[in-house]
C-alpha cells in the first residue's frame, strides 16, 4: 500500500489541549477583549480546526476558568484569565510555530480591516421613491473629520459616488477642505465686497 504523500502537508488541530492552547494564545496576542465570533474567526481562519471541536473547547476553556467573559461595547467578550495566562506561560512552546505565526497574521489583518472600517463609512440610504443619498463619515481616531449626506439621485449614481469616495477618502477630504477654505484674495473680496 502506498503512503499518501499529502497526509502531513496541512497540520490539523484536533488534540483538545492544542486547541485550548491556541485559543489562549489568540486571546493573549489580541491583547484586548474579543467576541465569540471574533475568536472563532481567528481560529478558523488561521488553523484547520473542526468547528464543533472549537466550540466545545471554547466552552471547556471558559468552564476551566482559563478565560473569562467581560462586558465591552454592549457585547460579552472573552479575555485571558490569570490561570489561563499561567497555563500559556508554561506550555506556549508546545504550540507549533506555524500555528502561532498564522494566528498572529490573522489577528493583525483582522484588526487592520476593522480599524479601516471604523475610519471610513459610506452608506447609501433611500431619500424617497427611487432616489438615494450617500452618507459619508471619515474619522481620525474618535474625532470626526467629515460627516455629510449628499443627494445622489439614482441608486447607480450613489454606487458610483460611493466607489469613488472609497478609492481615496483622504484625497477627497483634502479637496473639500481646499474648496471650503478661502484664498487671501477671496477673503479680501468678502471683506470689501
Image: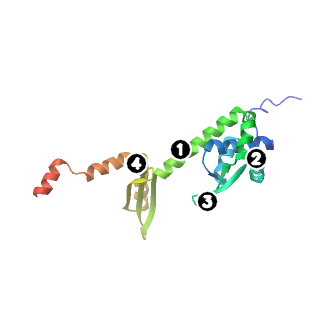
Query: Within 10 angstroms of label 3, few (less than 14), some, or many (20 or more) residues?
Result: few
Question: Which residue carries the number 1 mark?
Answer: 112
Asked whether 138 or 31 is in front, the reply is: 31
Query: Within 10 angstroms of label 4, few (less than 14), some, or many (20 or more) residues?
Result: many
- Nearer to us: label 2 or label 3: 3
Distance of mark 3 from mark 4, alpha carbons?
Answer: 30 Å
Task: Label 1, secondary structure: give it.
Answer: helix
The image quadrant that residue 75 belongs to is: bottom right
Q: Residue at x 44, y 56 (%)?
A: 159
Numbered tag placed on residue 50 in the rendering:
2
Q: Are marks 2 and 3 in contact (CB under 8 Å)?
A: no
Query: Within 10 angstroms of label 1, few (less than 14), some, or many (20 or more) residues?
Result: few
Q: Residue furthest left?
A: 192
Task: Label 3, secondary structure: give it.
Answer: strand
Numbered tag placed on residue 75 in the rendering:
3
Q: Residue at x 65, y 43 (%)?
A: 28
Q: Are marks 1 and 3 in contact (CB under 8 Å)?
A: no
Q: Earlier in the sequence, mark 1 or mark 3?
A: 3
- Nearer to us: label 3 or label 4: 3
Amino acid at each position: 500500500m502506498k503512503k499518501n504523500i499529502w497526509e502531513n502537508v496541512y497540520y490539523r488541530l484536533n488534540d483538545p489541549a492544542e486547541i485550548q492552547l491556541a485559543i489562549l494564545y489568540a486571546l493573549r496576542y489580541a491583547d484586548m477583549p474579543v467576541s465569540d465570533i471574533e475568536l472563532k474567526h481567528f481560529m478558523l481562519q488561521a488553523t484547520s480546526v473542526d468547528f464543533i471541536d472549537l466550540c466545545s473547547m471554547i466552552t471547556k476553556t471558559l468552564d476551566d476558568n482559563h478565560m473569562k467573559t467581560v462586558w465591552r461595547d454592549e457585547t460579552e467578550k472573552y479575555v485571558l484569565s490569570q490561570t489561563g495566562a499561567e497555563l500559556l506561560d508554561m506550555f506556549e512552546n508546545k504550540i507549533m510555530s506555524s500555528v502561532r505565526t498564522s494566528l498572529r497574521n490573522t489577528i493583525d489583518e483582522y484588526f487592520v480591516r476593522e480599524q479601516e472600517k471604523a475610519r471610513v463609512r459610506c452608506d447609501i440610504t433611500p431619500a424617497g421613491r427611487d432616489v438615494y443619498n450617500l452618507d459619508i463619515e471619515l474619522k481620525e481616531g474618535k474625532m470626526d473629520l467629515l460627516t455629510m449626506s449628499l443627494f445622489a439621485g439614482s441608486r447607480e449614481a450613489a454606487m458610483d459616488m460611493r466607489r469613488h469616495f472609497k478609492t481615496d477618502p483622504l484625497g477627497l477630504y483634502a479637496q473639500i477642505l481646499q474648496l471650503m477654505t478661502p484664498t487671501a484674495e477671496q477673503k479680501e473680496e468678502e471683506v470689501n465686497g
